[in-house]
Amino acid sequence: MNKKVVFSGVQPSGSLTLGNYIGALRNFGELQNEYDCYYCVVDMHAITVPQIAKDLRKRTLDVLALYIACGLDPEKSTLFVQSHVPAHAELSWVLNTVTYMGQLNRMTQFKEKSRKSDENLNAGLFTYPVLMAADILLYQTDFVPVGEDQKQHLELARDLAERFNNKYSETFKVPEPLIKEFGARIMSLQNPLSKMSKSDSDENAYILILDDKDSIRRKIKRAVTDSEGVVAYSDEQPGLKNLINIYSVLSSEDVETIVKRYESEGYGKFKEDLAEVVIAGLAPIQATYANLINSKDYLEKIYKEGADKAEYHAMKTLRKVYKKVGFIPRR
Ligand code: ATP
Ligand code: LTN
């Protein structure tokens, strides 16, 4: 029986946050028994914003180690680095030719990132979603687990798959997003109306998966709430709502239970307990990461084997695509 395919990617563009963990990594492991899973470290996406080469190399291994520390088993899932499989860039080129400029102009992430950048905009930032579509479509992916912010990019990938299929005959599986109802959008601790982002200039806005206990306690203590003074779960109290969401996901307790426990306590006690919940939730990941990151040979073996396996499947799709668009085969 052929298993359905899952694909997802994380950029090594900074240290991963609690948002990345709750919205993405945490959900990856649950899928690996039922599906044929590909989890990629998307280094080619990361260079759409300025990077220092030495740091990018380190962070690429960091993300790989974090994948494993978050429960991905290299025996079950294919873990690999995007730039090791050239088919990603190659398919991306072909897909560029069926993508409309207008579609890319409407991408919220592009609009936001270009607003923040004061340098000349690079074309890679603009065509970023096309590369993402290539990542997904190469593996005939059925499901893509991501956070809420990636929904629009997923829609583009579906659209490109359908357009290519209509133009050249059935070639790609049209993928579905897997976005959790709960925890798919963890908000900034300093501005609960914008998403927690690893590229935020204020380090109090995010908790990193690898933050130490004191930083976690300090950042949660400083998290922006409101002046209502009562622990409740409502859109009027977005800061608190976000903290309750984090508590709930990491403790596996439902929102109601949490609100009941703290409604007659102040925010102080709730925040203190939340910090301990976060520390306990991240501790096993941090411990495994610390072991792995010193095992360079092991990590190297994982990404080499992962790329070989990924490439085999990616090339099957790329060959089909090249044939359909009219490229003559080399042999
Ligand atoms: P940046 O925040 O720097 O723009 P990013 O964290 O969004 O980068 P990735 O590292 O590629 O970019 O994201 C990896 C995964 O984490 C994606 O599936 C994304 O949807 C998810 N994710 C990112 N931030 C959050 C968040 N605040 N809440 C939930 N999921 C998130
Ligand atoms: N754009 C994504 C990262 C990403 C991705 C993918 C996610 C690149 N390629 C393919 C899922 C599937 C982001 O989170 N910023």
Image (cartoon, rainbow, N blue to C red):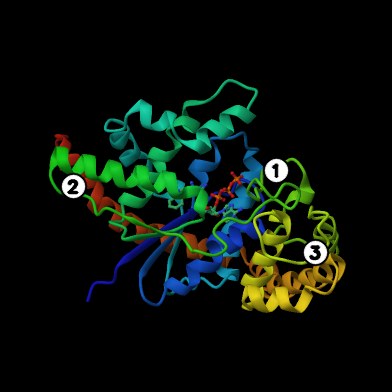
Picture residue at 80% right of the left edge, 62% below the top:
216
Query: Dot 1 surroundings within 10 Å: few (below 14), some, or many (20 or more)?
Result: few
Give the number of the disc on residue 200: 1
Image x and y of residue 162, in percent: 23, 44
Q: At 49% from the left edge and 71% from the top edge, which residue is drawn?
A: 29
Of helix, strand and loop, which one carries label 1?
loop
Quarter of the figure with the C terminus: top left
Q: What residue type is labelled 2?
A: Lys
> x and y percent of residue 111 in the render?
53, 31
Q: How far apart are marks 2 and 3 (CA)?
A: 49 Å
Q: Which of 100 and 97 is in front in this view?
A: 100
Q: Residue at x 33, y 39 (%)?
A: 90
Say which of marks 2 and 3 sits in front.
3
**Number of other residues with Cα within 10 Å of mark 2, as a class: few under 14, some 14 to 19, many 20 or more:** few
Q: Quadrant of residue 199?
A: top right
Earlier residue among tags 1 and 2: 1
Q: Which amino acid does label 1 sit on?
A: Asp
Q: Say which element carries label 2.
A: helix
* Dot 2 or dot 3, earlier in sequence: 3
Is 113 situated above or below 16?
Answer: above
Q: Identify residue for label 2.
A: 320
Q: Distance between the residues labelled 3 and 1?
A: 19 Å
> In what quadrant of the picture does the N terminus appear?
bottom left
Mark 3 CB within 8 Å of ligand 1: no
Residue 156: where, in percent of width, then height?
36, 42
Helix, strand or loop at disc 3? loop
**To which residue does mark 3 refer?**
212
Label 3 vs 1, first from the N-terminus: 1
Q: Do we see residue 116 in this rendering?
A: yes
Q: Does the residue labelled 1 lie within 8 Å of ligand 1?
A: yes
